[in-house]
């Protein structure tokens, strides 16, 4: 059981905490919430200036004059390719690049969503905050960067396979004249095959699909990158387990694809992930000199 002294102390602590809570609520209402709303309104006004420049027929002239004004008055230098959004925000805030960058993301995101300056405050409130809008833009940009990286890697895989020596020949229609189904946006086809009487036979040609080819190129690259880890350590086993691949099948896959060993796979993996490599049709992969 608590003593009278302990109960009195507890009552005093709770009384102080409740008082501070009330003061904090006033602070949030008067300073934080109000400050945020005033900042949103300022951003809306900045966007309104941007809109006047966007709809003008002399955007280049206005850019030049704003840049000159900032340089002459405050010694602030900006690049010629600075966007209208960033230029207006920099002029208004005289802020550093990071501040300008963050504010510009909010205005640009709103514009892309079809929101104008009249509705910007409500737009930010619905999103939650300036940081919430900015984070969404950052996430989209990061996703785009990753997508571009994957496309570049797939492009290198496609280049390697296009230039490499053929590993076999497939005859459709049992050697008769074949009307091969093709597609303008892809350069490869996918064929299903099976083993019959000790030999591999093509049993079906899959309808040409970019999605299937993209998956195949990514799987080829992944398998090659895992094969590159086969250096006698546990890394190879761990990677196979992580991606649900079988070590023995990878080794057979390497032989099927004329990949002699871990060193070849490592060089190919570096090529897929590095712009410093090119493919030489005579000698194989070559590292470009810096």
Image: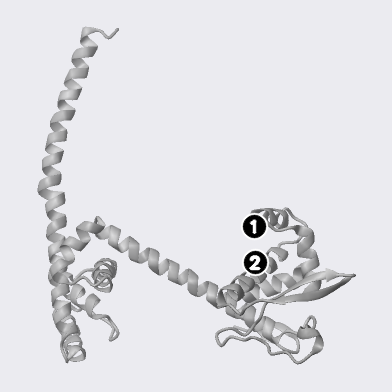
Q: Which residue is mark 1?
A: 243
Question: SS for tag 2?
Answer: helix
Mark 1 neighbour density, 10 Å: few (under 14) some (14–19) many (20 or more): few
CA distance separating discs 1 and 2: 9 Å
The answer to whether residue 246 is seen in the rendering is yes
Q: Quadrant of the C terminus?
A: bottom right
Q: Which residue is mark 2?
A: 222
Q: Quadrant of the N terminus?
A: top left
* Residue that appears at 78% across and 57% down: 232
- Point out residue 110 in the picture as x, y percentages from the top left corner: 24, 69
Q: Which color scheme is applied? A: one colour
* Residue that appears at 69% across and 81% down: 161
In the image, 139: left or right of 249?
A: left
- Point out residue 149 in the picture as x, y percentages from the top left corner: 52, 73
The answer to whether residue 275 is seen in the rendering is no
Can you tell which quarter of the image residue 237 is in? bottom right
- Point out residue 30 in the picture as x, y percentages from the top left corner: 9, 47
Label 1 close to label 2 by CB (< 8 Å): yes
Give the mark nearest the N terminus, 1 or 2.
2
What number is the disc on residue 119?
none
Q: Is residue 50 placed above or below 109 in the rendered structure?
A: below
* Residue that appears at 62% across and 78% down: 207
In the image, 290: left or right of 238?
A: left
Can you tell which quarter of the image residue 25 is in? top left
Mark 2 neighbour density, 10 Å: few (under 14) some (14–19) many (20 or more): some
Q: Nearer the viewer, residue 27 or 134?
A: 134
Question: SS for tag 1?
Answer: helix
Q: Nearer the viewer, residue 139 or 249?
A: 249
* Residue that appears at 68% across and 53% down: 241
In the image, 193: left or right of 19?
A: right
- Point out residue 40 in the picture as x, y percentages from the top left corner: 16, 62
């Amino acid at each position: 059981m608590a003593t009278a002294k302990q109960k009195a102390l507890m009552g005093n602590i709770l009384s102080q905490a409740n008082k501070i809570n009330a003061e904090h609520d006033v602070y949030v209402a008067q300073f934080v919430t109000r400050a945020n709303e005033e900042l949103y309104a300022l951003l809306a006004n900045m966007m309104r200036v941007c809109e006047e420049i966007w709809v003008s027929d002399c955007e280049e002239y206005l850019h030049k004059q704003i840049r000159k004004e900032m340089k002459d008055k405050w010694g602030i230098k900006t690049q010629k390719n600075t966007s209208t959004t960033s230029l207006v925000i920099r002029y208004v805030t005289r802020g550093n690049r990071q501040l300008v960058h963050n504010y510009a993301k909010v205005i640009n995101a709103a514009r892309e969503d079809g929101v104008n300056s009249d509705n910007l405050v409500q737009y930010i409130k619905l999103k939650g905050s300036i940081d919430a809008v900015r984070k969404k833009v950052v996430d989209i940009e990061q996703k785009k960067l990753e997508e571009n990286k994957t496309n570049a890697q797939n492009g290198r895989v496609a280049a390697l396979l296009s230039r490499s020596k053929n590993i076999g020949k497939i005859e459709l229609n049992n050697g008769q004249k074949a009307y091969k189904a093709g597609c303008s946006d892809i350069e490869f086809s996918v064929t299903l095959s099976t083993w019959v009487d000790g030999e591999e036979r093509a049993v079906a040609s899959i309808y040409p699909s970019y999605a299937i080819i993209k998956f195949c190129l990514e799987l080829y690259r992944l398998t090659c990158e895992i094969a590159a880890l086969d250096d006698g350590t546990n890394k190879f086993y761990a990677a196979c387990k992580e991606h649900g691949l079988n070590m023995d099948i990878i080794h057979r896959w390497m032989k099927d694809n004329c990949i002699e060993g871990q060193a070849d796979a490592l060089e190919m993996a570096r090529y897929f992930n590095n712009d410093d490599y090119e493919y030489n049709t005579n000698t194989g992969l070559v590292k470009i000199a810096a």
